[in-house]
Amino acid sequence: MNLHEYQGKEIFAKYDLPVSKGKVVTSLDEVEQACTDIGGSRWVAKAQVHAGGRGKSGGVALCDTIEEVANFTKKWLGKRLVTYQTDKEGQLVSCILVEECTNIADELYYSAVVDRSSREVAIIASSEGGVNIEKVAKETPEKIASISLNGKDISQGDIEKICSTLKLNDTQSSQMENIIRKTVSMFFECDLSLLEINPLVIKEDGNLHCLDAKINIDSNALFRQKELQEMHDPTQEDPRESEASKYDLSYVSLDGNIGCMVNGAGLAMGTMDTIKFFKGNPANFLDVGGTATQERVAKAFKIILDDPEVKVVLVNIFGGIVRCDLIAEGIVAAIDEVGVEIPVVVRLEGNSAEKGLAILSNSSSKIQSKNSLEDAARTAVELAR
């Protein structure tokens, strides 16, 4: 689960990390009071969406007057911001973060992330901040320090390595140690999968400051993070993905036109690869799981069909724990309920496959059954064209 910048900074503040004084506004009427409460004569207004690249897309503005803050708010509130990290539709701006202006002397990069290859938490820091860390890693890797934590703690030697890479003086190194130790504690206590401060800045007075905050929480741990779960903003997600999660369906929206319903993540990836092999484009990843019920299958089918780009649905089920006849009943129920006008190609194999195929053949729907994934994928691609 992703958090907005302002939410991330609220957590930072609880851990006593240096963040800017700011206010969140959800209407034009709140702008003047927010600027007055913050104080000063210059402010930074930031559109709040779950995506990076806001500055390059006009979603961040330095404002010299309250009127400029109001104009920015009027421009973006209720609109959709498109960045290089969003799709072509962009993400809805439901609120604006207004902050005091920070005088910056230098920009750094700092993050903590789960390294799935080593199954450890990695701390990454760079003397180049405010840019894509991937670009820095490729072009100037000597400017990056990467540390794998041994358990839930970090050694003094590793902290010194990070401070050396960032070229910090003694005072700044002491501040950096405080930031590192507190963010490491935060990472584990809040069940995070990513914590990123980009940029982590050195202010003109020489002190370190968290100018941005990006936090991702492990969704599988939300049952023990009730307070953080309340920060969930469904407006930032694909509505089909949100709906799918209610039924424990693993769904990810893509930009193709062949809807996929498969049981098993590996089989789903293989199905999409086979579609691509025949020059087609999957519209989604959807894993109905190994214990799919008729209700969940019917709901999965309706979620797929809710995508207006879908021209054909490919169902690929290998029956093991899940029974193919239950899948077939769910498909027929969904088709009857929704009134499907597009072709449906089904491949059933394994547990109760013959029963499932019989259910499909006896239905009034025009369903094409195939004996192999290759035949099913090729047929779906041809029908989509």
Image (tube, rainbow, N blue to C red):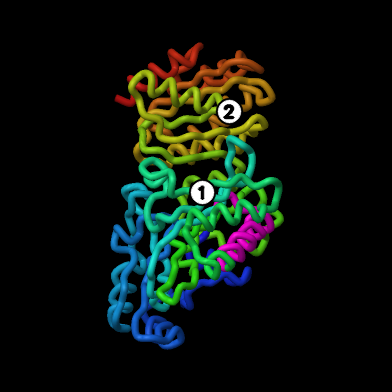
Is 87 placed left or right of 361 in the picture?
left
Horizontal side, residue 15 vs residue 139: left or right: right
- Looking at the image, tell me whether mark 1 or mark 2 is earlier in sequence order: 1
Does the magenta-highlighted stretch encompass residue 181? yes
Label 2 sits on residue:
263
Residue 192 position within the rendered picture, expressed as x and y whole percent measured from the top left: 61, 53
Q: On screen, 6 above or below 42?
A: above
Crowdedness near tag 1: few (<14), some (14–19) or many (≥20) residues, C-alpha within 10 Å? many
Mark sitting on residue 145: 1
Query: Foreground residue, 171 or 290?
Result: 171
Q: Is residue 229 visible?
A: no
Q: Is residue 308 above or below residue 290?
A: below
Magenta part of the protein: which range?
175-194
Q: Amino acid at mark 1?
A: Ala
Magenta span has 237?
no
Residue visible at 43% across and 43% down? Answer: 141
Q: Residue at x 38, y 77 (%)?
A: 101
